[in-house]
Amino acid sequence: MLDWNEVMTMARGKNPAPDRRVTKTEQEWRAQLSPEEYRVTRQAGTERPFSSDMCSLFEPGIYGCVCCDTLLFDASQKFESGTGWPSFTQPLKANAIAYVLDQSHGMMRVETNCNTCDAHLGHVFPDGPPPSGLRYCMNAVALKKVKAD
């Protein structure tokens, strides 16, 4: 189980190698993704809070990257954070997510990206529930349910 110290170590340039890499041109990404998916995942945008029904969905299943289908989160690790974005306590695998220190907007945050295709997913914060204390605050448009349990 990852904790905040491990996340910070990875964000400082020690991300694990992904299982595979997916690389496409900007034109290929634009052809594959909706305008909103492209803005969020390829341009590090943020969707409006509470704009997705995914926040209140808690059925079993696995969530993957909308860009490359890499499996990222298990619904059993999803919780209601009240923030307006789907939140999880842990990724499926330690190398599914890449972490980057984000000092934009006058804040110090840790950006989360798909470690396979570099899609911007959201951010992780150290204010989640036990036992990990992590809150992966994800953009719903960056995720898709790829497996049901």
Image: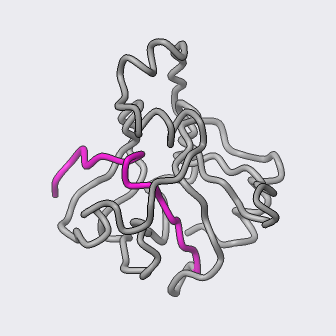
Q: Which residues are magenta?
A: 133-149
Relative height, residue 109 to residue 39 (above, below): below
Asked if the stretch drawn in magenta spans residue 89, the answer is no
State the residue at coordinates (45%, 21%): 29
- Name the side, left or right, on which 94 lies relative to 140: right
Residue 48 locus on image (x, y percent):
44, 60
State the residue at coordinates (35%, 22%): 32
State the residue at coordinates (30%, 46%): 144
Place residue 110 in its image quadrant.
bottom right
Residue 116 locus on image (x, y percent):
53, 33
Place residue 109 in its image quadrant.
bottom right
Relative height, residue 94 to residue 5 (above, below): above
Residue 149 locus on image (x, y percent):
16, 58
Relative height, residue 76 to residue 98 (above, below): below
- Name the side, left or right, on which 17 lies relative to 47: right
Residue 82 locus on image (x, y percent):
42, 82
Rendering colour mode: one colour
Who is closer to the viewer here, 130 or 44?
A: 44
Place residue 71 in its image quadrant.
top left
Which quadrant is the N terminus positioned in?
bottom right
Count numbered badges in the picture.
Answer: 0
State the residue at coordinates (75%, 70%): 5
Asked if the stretch drawn in magenta spans residue 143, the answer is yes
